[in-house]
Image: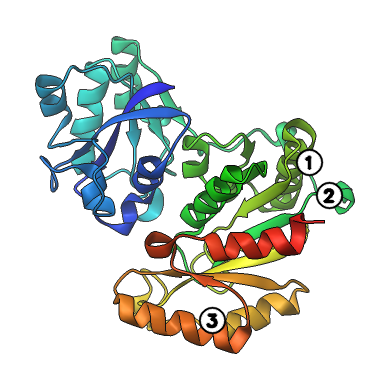
Amino acid sequence: MKKAVIFTHNLLAENFAKTAHGLLRGTSRFEILAVIDSANSGKDAGEVLDGKWLGIPTYKSIDEYIELSNGEAEVCVVGVAFPGGILPDACRYELISAMKNGLNIISGLHHYLSDDVEFQKIAKENKVELLDIRKTKPISDLHFWSGKILDVKTPIIAVLGTDCAVGKRTTARFMMESFQEKDIKTEIIFTGQTGWMQGYKHGFIFDSTPNDFVSGELEKAILECVQDSKPDLILLEGQSSLRNPSGPGGSELILSGNVNGVILVHPVGRKFFVDLEEFKYKIPEIEEEIMLIEAYGKKVIGVALNQENTSIDLLKENKKKIENNLGIPVSIPLTDGVEKIVEHINNEYLIE
């Protein structure tokens, strides 16, 4: 694993730092040594994220990290999904400092750092690499949907959400870890840049793939997973939501991914879609979203509740209500884990 620091500007405690959050919760690609975040310097990164100590310090700047630590990092990962995917000018100094200190830069932004003339020059002078993992593949390397996925016998469970940044990937990871503890070989198909950074072996980056090839690249990732890893279960990471007007996603995963069931992640404490509050664009009630998924011919087999901006009492109230109304397991992943959902999937799809 490459030794890495994560750059989050001053956003470690915010949803925008979801890439950093994913890496802090687990990665097999990097050994995380520190976080660079000016607003939270001096704190443990895990305590900022979940209130749980991780032993990963937070520094004000790259210069402070180099001065106060042993400076073993090889890589600086951009851990923030900035609005519009563009690197703010205020962040340039820190990444330039990282390069001048010999760190390679890995970025999942839509703003390709390797196309930036100033960054190119500094990277060349310091013999470091700029890796933009969101760069679109050549068309010659992309695939159309073939229908071969219809022959896959391995259960495929999609983890979708009713909005962006609700914990789809985190819920999938918790589920994977739980299944693996039971000696059930489980693989996650990543569909975003953070999944790649966490080291999952199979997947593609959904929002940097031309629309004509999304279904084919999804199918290809699943077929390769079945052939190469031979899992007992596949978990498919969702993106955005079916009805988020700024970036709808989900129908491709449901249909082209030929999933067997859906786990739906819902933010109880949100009224409007994230970043669309000014339009008062309401997130659908969870029962409505479940009906929509059922209209696609698939069944929601479990619900995970996001606990942002709400109380544990309200979460428990919603949990009880959904379980009573729908008769499916409901979990609050960050509080009580995902064991009820895992047991349900195990009983329904894996135990013969």
Tell me which corner region of the image, top left, top right, bottom left or bottom right, holds residue 298.
bottom right
Residue drawn where x is 79% and y is 49% of the image: 154
Q: Is residue 116 above or below residue 335?
A: above
Mark 3 neighbour class, 10 Å CA radius: few under 14, some 14 to 19, many 20 or more? some
Residue 77 shown left or right of residue 285 in the figure: left
For marks 2 and 1, give the CA distance.
7 Å
Could you tell me which secondary element the residue under label 1 belongs to? helix
**Whole-percent x, y for residue 233 in the image:** 71, 48
Count of residue discs: 3
The residue that disc 2 covers is 149
Given contact means CB atoms under 8 Å apart, are the residues at marks 3 and 1 in contact? Answer: no
Quick one: label 3 or label 1, which is nearer the N terminus? 1
Q: Is residue 339 above or below residue 219?
A: below
**Whole-percent x, y for residue 264 in the image:** 57, 69
> Front-most of 24 and 257?
24
Looking at the rendered structure, the kind of residue marked 3 is Ile
Looking at the rendered structure, the kind of residue marked 2 is Ile
The residue that disc 1 covers is 223
The residue that disc 3 covers is 286
Could you tell me which secondary element the residue under label 3 belongs to? helix
For marks 3 and 1, give the CA distance.
31 Å
For marks 2 and 3, give the CA distance.
29 Å
Looking at the rendered structure, the kind of residue marked 1 is Leu
